[in-house]
Amino acid sequence: MHIKSLERFWSKLVKKAEIHTIRTKLIISFLIMALLPFSIMTLFSYNTYFRGLMYRVSEYSQEVVSRMARELDEYFLDRSPAHQGTGLLLGSAD
């Protein structure tokens, strides 16, 4: 019962969607011929740009992290107990 009503729905939908005039057929075919290559190039360009952007962001992030690690290592080496005897600490009266 349910399948019959679904078949009737699809047959009515197909009948309403039929293209009757040559003018409409030409317009639709022109739009498909024009927009399909444009859409393909748009997707290709977007994917290429996005991959390049992600690569550059990744490289920059790795560079920033390594720079921060190097600076933190230098900071903690300067603050190590071996180096603290050489300088004056604020608030201490030696």
Image: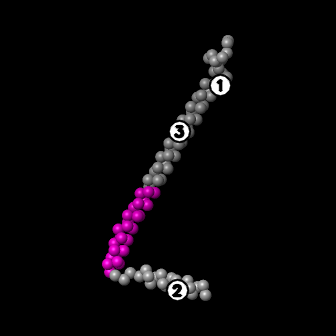
Q: What's the amino acid at mark 1?
A: Ser
Across and down, in percent, residue 76 comes to: 62, 28
Extreme residue in the top direction? 94
Q: What's the magenta region?
A: 22-47
Contact (Cβ within 8 Å) of mark 2 with mark 1: no
Main structural element of the magenta stretch: helix, strand or loop?
helix
Give the label on residue 40, or none: none
Residue 36, can we see it? yes
Q: Nearer the viewer, residue 8 or 78?
A: 8
User: Which circle's residue, 3 or 2, is located before the other in the chain?
Assistant: 2
User: Residue tagged by mark 2?
Assistant: 8
Characterize the local packing of mark 1: few (<14), some (14-19) or many (20 or more) Cα atoms within 10 angstroms.
few
Q: Residues within 10 Å of mark 2 (few under 14, many from 20)?
A: few
Nearest the eye: 92 or 14: 14
Q: Amino acid at mark 2?
A: Arg
State the quadrant of the N terminus: bottom right
Is 25 in the magenta? yes
Q: Residue at x 51, y 82 (%)?
A: 10
- Residue at label 1? 80
Is residue 2 left or right of 29 when viewed as pictured? right
Q: Position of residue 38 (x, y in %)?
A: 38, 64
Task: Determine the secondary structure under disc 3.
Answer: helix
Separation (CA) of disc 1 from disc 3: 24 Å
* Left-right relation of 89 to 53: right
What residue sits right under mark 3 in the picture? 64
